[in-house]
């Protein structure tokens, strides 16, 4: 089996590549990644010399480069992780989100049509459903919840999802879509809540919590997401959407306090800052369908996952220190100074 994994130098894509190479030693895995600010070749260091792995630096919007790769590799499956993924950046500069997340998806699917494919899998997000109110804990997102996006990021992901379903209906392209809740774990880029708080706490810097910190996210350990996608590409039904989430809802402020406790840092580092524009209140996934149809269940409990994650950031300081000491400093300054 030849599998192209786009966006594999990022957080979830890299974890997915490690998962595939471990579990399917006969498969050939090709990573296609543009290496934007979020992509990091050092993340893939441990597999670069693996004979079953190939890395190609390219943009998913570059039709010629994508076609050349398909001609060379004749992939059976394409799993598309490549995306601009940070909500705050999408509020500052929406256009690149439309370009990569929508046009890039179209280019990949056009190429799948041209060369033939067993499966195109789109990695989507629970954010396409919008948010749920805090006072209705009985409500969850199911696969039939209407799309109701809040940010340029989630709108671009929803646009891509609609296009994927259109390619299925119009051209019969064999597609599947997964919509997962917030992931956490190793190689998570330090602009996101959990790694940002770990890095700042370790450096005794303020911990910037948006608004009152009462927004709720449904956290899933990244390896569990990878296992869900593995099941979907092998056993999932073509044309179907699968929600992925672990029923692990937590308020942001409680996550930040937990990180302080685990690292032995004072909660006085916590600073409440101006809220995110259009900030979604609560995400909560109903994962019944993937459980009943494919037997998926999350395996890592949050207490264990966060412990493993914190240990990983302690043991891999160079990975994130190299990031936060580079161009990231300008981003941080722009987003957080005088906020
Ligand atoms: P990330 O930002 O860590 O990684 C994105 C990767 O895509 C990077 O390696 C980057 O270089 C690459 N990339 C960006 N633009 C590209 C382009 N034009 N061509 C080729 N490569 C490009 O993102 P992530 O958190 O790993 O998310 C991966 C996917 O999962 C995204 O589609 C995201 O929408 C989705 N998702 C993420 C989460 C989460 O909690 N992080 C949850 C649900 C869904
Ligand atoms: O400094 C911060 N302070 C803060 O309070 C940051 C970076 C975030 N937050 C809050 C905003 C959110 O309520 O923490 C929560 C989580 O924020 P992010 O880590 O930016 O994630 P989120 O916006 O929930 O989106 C994530 O999950 C869904 C991913 O980035 C998306 O790619 C995915 O689709």
Image (spheres, rainbow, N blue to C red):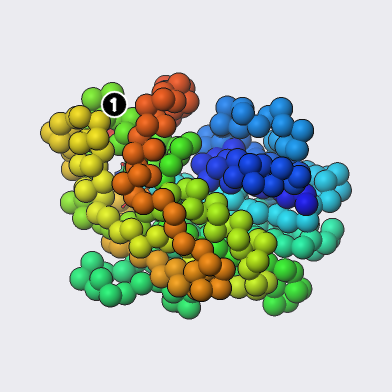
Q: Residue furthest left?
A: 268
The image position of residue 190, as x and y in percent, is 40, 35
Picture residue at 13% right of the left edge, 33% below the top: 268
The image position of residue 98, as x and y in percent, is 56, 55
Residue 118 visible in the picture: yes
Picture residue at 20% right of the left edge, 42% below the top: 257
Which quadrant of the figure has residue 111?
bottom right
Picture residue at 86% right of the left edge, 48% below the top: 71
Picture residue at 71% right of the left edge, 27% below the top: 49
151 lies left or right of 275: right
The image position of residue 166, as x and y in percent, is 66, 73
The quarter of the picture where the C terminus appears is top left
* Image height of 145 relative to 23, above or below: below
Which quadrant of the figure has residue 118?
bottom right
123 lies left or right of 189: right
Residue marked by disc 1: 202
The image position of residue 218, as x and y in percent, is 35, 58
Residue 333 visible in the picture: no
219 lies left or right of 147: left
Q: Tag 1's secondary structure?
A: helix
* Image height of 180 relative to 269, above or below: below
Callout count: 1
Depth order, front residue of 260/84: 260
Which quadrant of the figure has residue 335?
top left
77 lies left or right of 323: right
Depth order, front residue of 260/268: 260
Q: Is mark 1 within 8 Å of ligand 2?
A: no
* Image height of 274 relative to 167, above or below: above
* Mark 1 residue crowding within 10 angstroms, few (<14) / some (14–19) / many (20+): some
């Amino acid at each position: 089996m030849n599998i192209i994994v786009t966006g594999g130098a990022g957080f979830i894509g890299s974890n997915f590549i490690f998962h595939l190479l471990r579990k399917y030693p006969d498969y050939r895995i090709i990573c296609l990644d543009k290496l934007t600010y979020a992509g990091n070749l050092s993340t893939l260091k441990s597999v670069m010399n693996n004979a079953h792995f190939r890395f190609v630096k390219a943009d998913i919007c570059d039709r010629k480069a994508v076609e050349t790769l398909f001609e060379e590799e004749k992939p059976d499956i394409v799993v598309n992780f490549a995306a601009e993924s940070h909500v705050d950046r999408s509020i500052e500069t929406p256009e690149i989100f439309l370009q990569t997340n929508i046009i890039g998806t179209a280019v990949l699917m056009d190429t799948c049509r041209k060369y033939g494919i067993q499966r195109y899998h789109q990695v989507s997000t629970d954010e396409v459903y919008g948010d749920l109110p805090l006072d209705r804990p009985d409500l969850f997102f199911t696969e039939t919840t209407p799309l109701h996006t809040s940010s340029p990021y989630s709108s671009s992901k929803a646009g891509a999802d609609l296009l994927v379903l259109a390619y299925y209906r119009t051209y019969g392209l064999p597609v599947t879509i997964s919509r997962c809740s917030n992931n956490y774990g190793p190689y998570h880029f330090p602009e996101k809540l959990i790694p940002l708080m770990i890095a700042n706490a370790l450096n005794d810097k303020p911990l910037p919590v948006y608004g009152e910190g009462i927004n709720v996210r449904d956290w899933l350990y990244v390896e569990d997401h990878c296992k869900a996608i593995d099941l979907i590409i092998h056993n999932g039904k073509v044309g179907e959407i699968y929600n992925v989430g672990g029923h692990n809802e937590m308020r942001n402020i409680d996550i930040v306090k937990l990180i302080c406790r685990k690292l032995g840092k004072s909660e006085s580092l916590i600073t409440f800052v101006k809220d995110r524009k259009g900030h979604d209140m609560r995400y909560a996934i109903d994962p019944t369908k993937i459980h009943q149809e494919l037997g998926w269940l999350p395996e890592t409990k949050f207490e264990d996952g966060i412990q493993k994650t914190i240990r990983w950031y302690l043991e891999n300081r160079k990975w994130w220190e190299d990031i936060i000491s580079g161009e990231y400093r300008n981003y941080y300054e722009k987003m957080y100074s005088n906020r």
